Amino acid sequence: MPAPTSTAGAAESGPPRTELQELQLKADQTTDESLESTRRMLALCEEIRPLKLPEAEGNLRKIESVRVT
């Protein structure tokens, strides 16, 4: 069993964590940060979509008019 680490913060209470627990905590924090970043990116995409839609429709009309002539 891995030895407890001494990197525990002063604000933390409870028994010291093992190296494995520290690594799992860091992995969980990284996953949480990545998930939150993904949520922010999706929110920005949803915010931008109405702005890009008229431009895309205009481009589609141009393509269709070139194809017809």
Image: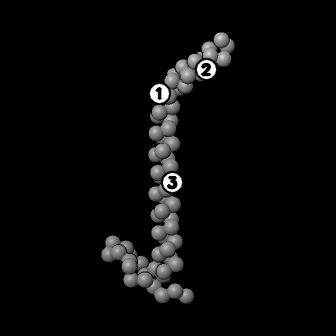
Residue named by callout 1: 51
Indicate the amino acid at tag 1: Leu
Q: Position of residue 63 (x, y in %)?
A: 61, 20
Residue named by callout 2: 63
Residue 42: assigned label: none
Could you tell whether 45 is left or right of 63 in the image?
left
- Measure the alpha-carbon separation of dots 3 and 1: 25 Å
Residue at 45% x, 85% y: name it: 4
Residue 35: assigned label: 3
Q: Position of residue 5 (x, y in %)?
A: 43, 83
Question: Is residue 58 depicted above or below 34 in this figure?
Answer: above
Single out the mark in the foreground, 3 or 2. 2
Question: Is residue 20 depicted above or below 48 in this figure?
Answer: below
Indicate the amino acid at tag 2: Ile
Indicate the amino acid at tag 3: Leu
Q: Quadrant of the N terminus?
A: bottom right
Q: Closer to the N terminus: mark 3 or mark 2?
A: 3
Outermost residue toward the left?
A: 10
Could you tell whether 48 is left or right of 13 in the image?
right
Instruction: Classify 10 Å Cα crowding around label 3: few (below 14), some (14-19), many (20 and above).
Output: few
- Measure the alpha-carbon separation of dots 3 and 2: 38 Å
Question: Is residue 16 depicted above or below 27 in this figure?
Answer: below
State the SS at label 3: helix
Across the whole image, how many numbered discs are drawn on residues?
3
Camera-side residue of 29 and 50: 50
Question: Is residue 54 depicted above or below 40 in this figure?
Answer: above
- Measure the alpha-carbon separation of dots 2 and 1: 20 Å
